[in-house]
Image (cartoon, rainbow, N blue to C red):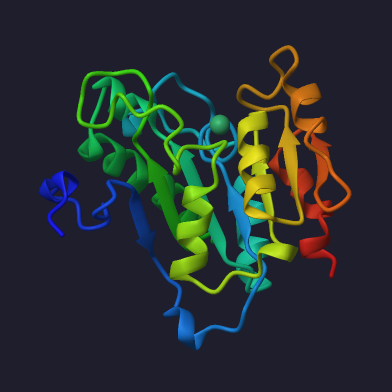
Amino acid sequence: MISKFSISEYPFVSQTGVWEENRTLPAQKDLDKSPALFLDRDGVIVKEVNYLQNPKDVELIQGAAEIIAKANKNKIPVIMVTNQAGIAYGYFGWEEFDAVQHQVHNDLEKLGACIDAVFACPFHQKGDTLWGGHPDHEARKPLPGMLLRAEKMLNIDFANSWIVGDRASDIEAGLHAGLAGGLHVLTGHGSREGETDLANALETPQFKVRSGANIIDAMQLPIFNA
Ligand SMILES: [Mg+2]
C-alpha cells in the first residue's frame, strides 16, 4: 500500500505517519513478556518548552535519568510516547524532532540511562499540513494508538505496565490501553489548574492513578517493587 506518509525520509516514520523507533530491544519473539514503563517526554523527561524544536532548549528534569537507569537495570523496557502537534501546525518537522531526540538521548546516556523505544504522533485536528485536520487521531493521546503500536512491536505485559505523564490525557491513554495505572506528575503542565483532578478522575477498580511531584516518584510504583 502506498501511503502519503511514506515520502518521509525518516526511517522510523511508518506508513501510518507515526514515528515508531525500537532503539535497543530484541524482536518480540525473542522477548519474555515484560511490563513496560511508558513515559511522556515534554514536562516529564525534559522541561516543558512550548513546541520544543531546538536541541539547545533541551533540559532534563531532575530524576529522569535516575528512574530510566533504574528501569534499565531491572530490565523494564522504557518507552517514550509523545504527542508532537507542532508538526501538524507546521511549526517544525521531523528533522527538528530528530535533532531534539538526539540531544535527549545523549544527555540521558551520559548519565547511564537509555530510552528503549520511541513513539511520536504528529497528528492534530488543527493545522493545514499533511498532519493537520485529524480530529481524534487514534495515535494521539488520550487515545492509545502509540501504546498499541509498542505492544505490537515489542512484547509488553500491559496489565502490569505504567505510564507517567504531566497531562491527564497521558494517563487516559494508559487507561484506554489497559495498563495497571498512571502516575500524574506536577512538572510541565501538571500543576495547571484542574489537571490533577482530571487525572485522578480516571481511576477505576482496574486502573490506579497515583500523584507525584516529579518523575522520581515513579520509584514507588509497583513496577519497581514487584
Ligand atoms: Mg507532557
Q: Residue 16: percent from the left, percent from the top?
A: 29, 50
Q: Is residue 218 left or right of residue 119?
A: right
Of all residues shown, which one is farthest toward the top?
Answer: 193
Q: Residue drawn 42% across and 80% down?
A: 27
Q: Quadrant of residue 125?
A: top left
**The one of 152 and 196 positioned closer to us in this rendering:** 152
Residue 213 vertical position relative to residue 161 in the rendered view, above or below? above
- In the rendered image, the quadrant that contains the N terminus is bottom left
Residue 62 appears in the picture as rendered: no
**Residue in the picture at 72% in, 33% down:** 185
Q: Is residue 121 above or below residue 67?
A: above
Residue 24, horizontal then vertical, whole percent: 42, 71
- Left/right placement of residue 111 relative to residue 98 reads right
Which residue is situated farthest in the front direction here? 1
The reply, left or right, for residue 160 in relation to residue 113 is right
Look at the picture and state if 116 lies above or below 86.
Answer: below
Left or right of residue 89: residue 172: right
Rendered location of residue 114, percent (x, y): 50, 61
Quadrant of res 45: top right
Where residue 193 appears, as percent x and y from the top left, is: 73, 12
Quadrant in which the C terminus is drawn: bottom right
Residue 67 visible in this rendered orientation of the protein: yes
Q: Nearer the viewer, residue 161 or 185?
A: 161
Residue closer to the observer: 76 or 6: 6
Q: Quadrant of ligand 1?
A: top right
**Near-viewer residue (99 or 59):** 99
Residue sitting at 58 percent across and 47 percent down?
39
